[in-house]
Amino acid sequence: MIPFEVLVRFLHFVASLLLLGSFSFTLLVARPAAKKASEARSCFLTLSRTQLLIARWALPLAIVSAFVALAIKIDTATGQSWSAFHHTDALTAVLTGTRFGIVWMARMLIAGLLAVMLLLYLRGSVRADSLILSITGMIFSGLFLVALAFTGHAAAAEGVTFVVQVLADAFHLLAAGV
């Protein structure tokens, strides 16, 4: 079980980092470069579409791996098999009675907002090179990634130590994603 859990966490981190990286690269690197170099402007739309393609693959991977991580957490917390994932009591206990569960629900809300954003793009309501799309995508994917700091080892403290450790972990995650 441990190697599988490590694989799930690895895939989840990769997907979460790719989400933030795709939006932040477009906003912080490609957009300013396209404004300064006239020949880069024609490539900017293509690059924006490619970055959104990465996000469109990373988001489902992040969501699926988050659900698998939840099932693993239920197995760990309850001592029951993965079949407990379908039992309302075990699922409710983990989702509402643990920090992991509360953060997991918040992250799934953020993932839903990201999904809506990407659907608006796919439906043609928002252009790939939209500044608003890049900014909101970077904010939501940043929050999605930073929330992981509240479920890791850094969150295993109290008081000022908790705040310092979670902030340090959050900045570390952001630095890796941007």
Image (cartoon, helix red, strand yellow):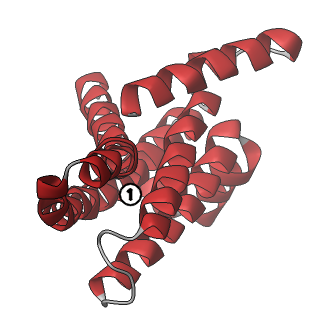
The residue under the point 29% across, 37% down is 8
Q: Secondary structure at mark 1?
A: helix
Please say if 42 is above or below 125: above
Determine the residue located farthest toward the top in the rendered image. Answer: 161
Of residue 166 and residue 99, the one placed in the foreground of this image is 166
x, y percentage for residue 21? 33, 42
Up/down of 56 relative to 62, above or below: below
> Who is closer to the viewer here, 84 or 163?
163
Left or right of 57? Residue 9 is right
- Give the vertical position of 100 relative to 111 (above or below): above
In this view of the protein, can residue 35 be seen by the observer? yes
Toward the viewer: 50 or 32? 32
Other-residue count near label 1 (Cα within 10 Å), few / some / many at <14 / 14–19 / ≥20: some
Image quarter (top left, top right, bottom left or bottom right) of the C terminus: top left
Image coordinates of residue 144 in percent, x first then y, are 52, 48
Residue 157 visible in rendering: no
**Which residue is the site of mark 1?**
63
Number of marks drawn: 1
Residue found at x 39% / y 43%:
28
Image point 49% across, 68% down: which residue? 132
Horizontal and vertical percent for residue 4? 25, 32
Furthest-right residue in view?
Answer: 159
- From the image, which quarter does the N terminus lie in? top left
- 34 left or right of 79 in image: left
Q: Is residue 93 left or right of residue 128?
A: right
Does residue 93 lie above or below 125 as drawn?
A: above
Amino acid residing under circle 1: Ile
Residue 89, position in %: x, y?
Answer: 66, 59
Q: Is residue 66 left or right of residue 92?
A: left
- The residue lying toward the viewer, choosing from 17 and 64, is 17
> At x 39% / y 71%, what residue is drawn?
130
